[in-house]
């Protein structure tokens, strides 16, 4: 059957041609202009975030779309900031796949202001300078480049407090009133002292604290200088404040006050509902996380008191626009609106992310949270936000902190000698900075 | 259908007149094999060869992901630094120990399973297919489930251990415990796959050998050791090489076990692959990560080479005997 064979040969040749063609097309590069954009003036703004900024949940996107009928907002979200940062850096290096708006954690903002001013838009171009008065001074300063570029607009800040379980405190015979507790643990020594009392009479399988890593993080958040000095010198291993935070964390670990859970691990998540710990240091953004993990059953069992040892800040974020973004001008309008006092206020009331806008901080002063036994969250976090030191931010804050909390976990969970663990931390930091 | 071309060879065509279309056809006939293999080699050049060479190039520089434009020449420093790098040696040792405690039980169990499945069993096809299920499961899904099972406070394994009076084991923190946990995932995923390969190998061993052995009065055990195992030697060499490569590259399981790029708080189960990832995508030191990648590559070449050499010498000995 010669005809059939010829036909087969033709098909095979066609196949090879198609394959080569497809390959060439694939190599030919991407010209993916958004077809929905253009002619009718409709645009899609992409927003890429990490953790929970809460804009969608608070209905802010829907509101913005109503105000701007030509805009559709599409959000992508990565749970873990470290993963998000990896992916963002990879895309910045490659120059593709960037969203119109990218979220930046405060621990990373120094990388942007010191190393990547050429990769993000200077928002002064769009008139951002006029917004300066709206924001807490430190928040604004941290996102300013060396030659005065404005590289991001502040979203939330992370004023710190202490969250605790009133039901567990009661069982262990401790006071549950937030004012009284604030006095008893006005210093960290008082907090550890109370912890030892708790341990003596604690319910079964319940520790005083979730992990010494979180204790360390909250304590270092109370310091102005942490890993770098104001002049940009690496000082972490001789910083007395850091050494003190280390020693206190070691003491907590060695007194067995911790539930020995890694923050953000699945086991840590499960422990919220199980009541494995009675206190957890909580920056404002942690409230939403606690509600999510402890669920409805936790309603009314939690309360919030002032943080031992003074005010501090842990975390907070910015919204930035990459140079490679498609709709920069529209993106600027969006982030300007999202970070405006009115929206920051709404966000705090609905999600608990504490405003970095000075106007909004005053507006939320009267807020209470029924989930946390009607604790005056607006006042507690507002006071902390005002009193928190202006932190010196460095390039590798986040990575150094990770090495230190890892070493603390060694002391906590493996009983490693603290001196040895400190050496491990030093080695880890050296390797990180390499 | 495709064989029909072989069965009925085309009649010898008369020499074609030198016309245009014919010359084109002849050119096509000459070139077409290259066109057919072109897709593979284009892809290989783009995604295999180029990255390999570019990685070697990058490994000679200090390059950071945040500032990929600034490359600082380091020569072989990235390589020599590895020799004094404790974390590198830890991860190399971990790769080896995890490799052993995952590969050995995996292959031994696979051999046993294959032997059992080689008997006439009820629902044999079902059993054989079921064995491939773990292999078909994604690394991520399997690891996340195992991470839950190995949980310290609420894990099923510690719960069961608790019933028989074994105190809670910290499967994440302990060096031995965590390595066993990670290896368990590997063993679970790959045992069935290897068993099927062994099974295929067993079925190609001539039945007469068994009959002859039986006539000589060899027990089932002796048959297994003296007929099955020697017959399987090439298959075993193949699986050993493939599992060794897999073990050297082990990455997904230790990464997802706790979601820690350091392989645990003390790097207790950080493998070479994970260390490379940590350098590249945790610390953004692309040059150092590239150097580790090349060391891994050379290591695999050496290990496989030694494996192949041993196998070759054994077969030669057999032949001489």
Image (cartoon, coloured by chain):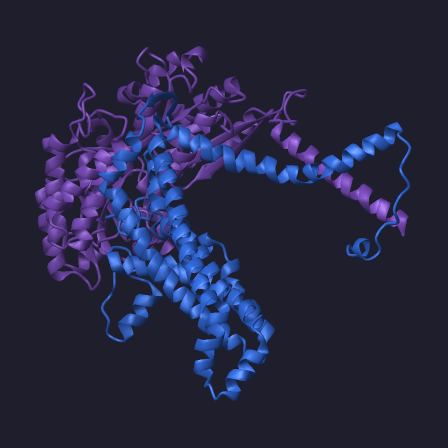
Chain colours: A purple, B blue
User: In the figure, A11 relative to A278: above or below?
Assistant: above
User: In the figure, A103 relative to B147: above or below?
Assistant: above
Label total for image: 0
Q: Looking at the rendering, in which quadrant would you find the N terminus of chain B? A: bottom right
Place of residue B270 in the rendered image (x, y in percent of width and height, measured from the top left) = 31, 48
User: In the figure, B152 relative to A54: above or below?
Assistant: below
Please give the name of the residue rendered at 32% of the width and 71% of the height, measured from the top-left corner: B160
Please give the name of the residue rendered at 38% of the width and 42% of the height, measured from the top-left corner: B298
Q: Is residue A4 left or right of residue A225?
A: right
Q: In this view, does A92 lie to the left or right of B270?
A: right
Q: Is residue B169 visible?
A: yes
User: In the figure, B30 relative to B198: above or below?
Assistant: above
Q: In this view, does A29 lie to the left or right of A264?
A: right
Place of residue A196 in the rendered image (x, y in percent of width and height, measured from the top left) = 10, 54
Place of residue B197 in the rendered image (x, y in percent of width and height, measured from the top left) = 53, 64
Which image quarter: residue A226? top left
Q: Can residue B171 be seen in this view?
A: no
Place of residue B82 in the rendered image (x, y in percent of width and height, measured from the top left) = 27, 38
Along the line of sight, the residue nearer the viewer: A298 or B177: B177
Along the line of sight, the residue nearer the viewer: A285 or B150: B150
Q: In this view, does B111 lie to the left or right of A405?
A: right
Along the line of sight, the residue nearer the viewer: A378 or A53: A53
Q: Looking at the rendering, in which quadrant would you find the C terminus of chain B? A: bottom left
Which image quarter: residue B147? bottom left
**Which residue, as the protein is rendered here, is positioned at the far front?**
B320
């Amino acid at each position: 059957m010669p005809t059939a064979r010829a036909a087969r040969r033709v098909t095979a040749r066609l196949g090879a041609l198609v394959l080569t063609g497809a390959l060439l097309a694939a190599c030919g590069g991407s010209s993916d202009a958004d077809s929905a954009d253009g002619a009718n003036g409709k645009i899609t703004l992409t927003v890429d975030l990490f953790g929970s900024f809460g804009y969608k949940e608070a209905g802010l996107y829907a509101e913005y779309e109503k105000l701007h009928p030509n805009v559709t907002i599409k959000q992508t979200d990565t749970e873990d900031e470290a993963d998000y940062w990896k992916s963002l850096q990879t895309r910045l290096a490659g120059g593709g796949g960037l969203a119109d708006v990218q979220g930046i954690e405060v621990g990373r903002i120094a990388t942007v202001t010191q190393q990547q001013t050429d990769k993000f838009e200077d928002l002064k171009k769009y008139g951002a300078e006029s917004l300066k008065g709206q924001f807490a001074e430190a928040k604004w300063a941290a996102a300013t480049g060396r030659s005065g570029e404005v590289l991001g607009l502040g979203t939330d800040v992370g004023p710190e407090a202490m969250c605790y379980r009133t039901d567990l405190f009661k069982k262990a015979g401790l006071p549950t009133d937030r004012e009284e507790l604030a006095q008893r643990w006005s210093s960290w020594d008082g907090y550890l002292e109370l912890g030892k009392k708790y341990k003596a009479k604690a319910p079964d399988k319940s520790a005083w604290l979730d992990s010494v890593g979180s204790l360390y993080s909250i304590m270092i958040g109370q310091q102005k200088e942490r890993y770098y000095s104001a002049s940009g010198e690496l000082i972490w291993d001789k910083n007395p404040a850091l050494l003190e935070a280390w020693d206190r964390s070691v003491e907590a670990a060695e007194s067995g006050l911790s539930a020995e859970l890694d923050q953000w691990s699945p086991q840590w998540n499960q422990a919220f509902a199980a009541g494995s710990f009675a206190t957890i240091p909580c920056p404002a953004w942690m409230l939403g996380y606690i509600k999510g993990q402890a669920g409805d059953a936790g309603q009314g069992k939690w309360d919030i008191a002032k943080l031992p040892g003074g005010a501090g800040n842990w975390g907070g974020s910015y919204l930035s626009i990459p140079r490679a973004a498609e709709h920069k001008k529209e993106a600027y309008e969006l982030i300007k609106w999202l970070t405006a006092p009115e929206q920051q206020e709404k966000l705090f009331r609905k999600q608990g992310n504490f405003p970095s806008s000075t106007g909004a901080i005053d507006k939320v002063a009267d807020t209470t949270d029924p989930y946390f036994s009607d604790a005056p969250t607006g006042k507690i976090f507002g006071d902390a936000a005002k009193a928190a030191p202006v932190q010196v931010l460095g390039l590798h804050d986040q990575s150094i902190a990770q090495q230190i909390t890892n070493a603390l976990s060694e002391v906590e969970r493996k009983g490693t000698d603290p001196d040895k663990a400190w050496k491990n931390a030093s080695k880890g930091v050296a390797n990180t900075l390499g | 259908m495709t064989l029909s071309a072989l069965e009925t060879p085309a009649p010898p065509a008369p020499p074609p007149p030198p016309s245009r279309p014919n010359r084109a056809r002849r050119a096509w006939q000459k070139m077409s094999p290259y066109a057919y293999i072109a897709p593979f080699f284009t892809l290989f050049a783009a995604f295999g060869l180029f990255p390999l060479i570019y990685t070697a190039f990058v490994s000679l520089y200090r390059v950071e992901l945040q500032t990929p434009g600034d490359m600082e020449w380091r020569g072989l420093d990235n390589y020599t630094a590895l020799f004094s790098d404790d974390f590198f040696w830890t991860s190399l040792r971990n790769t080896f120990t995890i490799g052993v405690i995952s590969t050995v039980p995996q292959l031994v169990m696979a051999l046993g399973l294959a032997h059992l499945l080689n008997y006439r069993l009820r629902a044999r096809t079902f059993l054989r297919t079921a064995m491939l299920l773990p292999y078909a499961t994604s690394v991520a899904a399997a690891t996340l489930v195992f991470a839950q099972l190995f949980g310290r406070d609420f894990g099923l394994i510690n719960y069961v251990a608790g019933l028989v009076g074994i105190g809670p084991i910290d499967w994440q923190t302990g060096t031995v415990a965590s390595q066993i946990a990670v290896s368990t995932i590997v063993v679970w995923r790959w045992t069935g796959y290897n068993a099927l390969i062994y099974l295929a190998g067993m079925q190609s061993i001539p039945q007469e050998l068994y009959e002859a052995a039986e006539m000589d009065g060899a027990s089932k055990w002796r048959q297994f050791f003296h007929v099955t195992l020697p017959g399987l030697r090439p298959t075993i060499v193949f699986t050993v090489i493939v599992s060794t490569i897999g073990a050297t590259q082990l990455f997904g399981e230790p990464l997802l076990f706790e979601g820690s790029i350091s392989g645990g708080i003390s790097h207790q189960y950080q493998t070479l692959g994970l260390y490379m990832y940590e350098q590249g995508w945790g610390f953004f030191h692309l040059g150092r990560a590239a150097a580790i990648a090349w060391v891994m590559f050379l290591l695999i070449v050496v290990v496989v080479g030694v494996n192949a050499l041993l196998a070759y010498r054994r077969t030669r000995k057999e032949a001489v005997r």
